[in-house]
Image: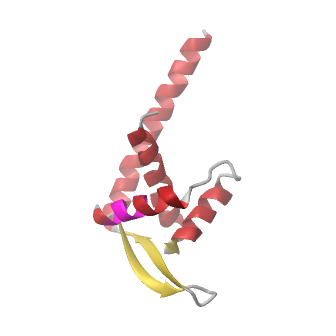
Amino acid sequence: MAKNDLQGSLDLLVLKTLSQMGELHGYGIVLHIQRASDELLSVEEGSLYPALHRMEQSGWIRSEWKLTDTNRKAKYYRLTAAGQKELRKAEESFAQLVKGVRAVLRHAQG
């Protein structure tokens, strides 16, 4: 897969997580993706935070510093209307990718 496809997959996972869970800090996003995927997917902080920064620059998410349950300061992220629109596009694009991969796999077996 090309780097952009992988980056797009991370964007999709983060946007979907924020859509489902509401406002979360980075570690909360990582945990949700891990748990929701039955531990099949893990997101490294070295990939997550640059992606969050890029998505914030694109206007897909907004952030705000708040205190966590353990009284630590953390940046919390939430989806914007533009992020919701991007999520729909990313879901459609991913569905097309999966459809294409399935077609190739079926053809390779035939």
Give the image location of residue 7, x and y in percent: 42, 47
Does residue 71 appear to the left or right of 57 in the view shown? right
Task: Farthest residue to the bottom: give it.
Answer: 71
User: Which scheme is used to colour this image of the protein?
Assistant: secondary structure
Task: Say which quarter of the image contains residue 31.
Answer: bottom right
Does residue 38 appear to the left or right of 87 in the view shown? right
Residue at 50% of width from left, 54% of height from top?
13
Task: Say which quarter of the image contains residue 43.
Answer: bottom right
- The rendered magenta stretch, by its main secondary structure, is classed as helix
Residue at 43% of width from left, 72% of height from top?
78
Vertical order, 106 against 93 (above or below): above
Q: Nearer the viewer, residue 54 or 14?
A: 54
Q: Nearer the viewer, residue 104 or 41?
A: 41
Q: Is residue 53 something that shows in the picture?
A: yes
Give the image location of residue 2, x and y in percent: 42, 35
Residue at 62% of width from left, 12% of height from top?
109
Task: Farthest residue to the top: give it.
Answer: 110
Residue at 41% of width from left, 43% of height from top?
92
Task: Farthest residue to the right: give it.
Answer: 38
Task: Say which quarter of the image contains residue 3.
Answer: top left
Give the image location of residue 58, x and y in percent: 28, 61
Position of the C terminus by quadrant = top right
Q: Is residue 16 something that shows in the picture?
A: no
Vertical order, 22 against 90 (above or below): below
Q: Which residues are magenta?
A: 51-56
Vertical order, 5 against 104 (above or below): below
Residue 41 counted in the magenta span: no
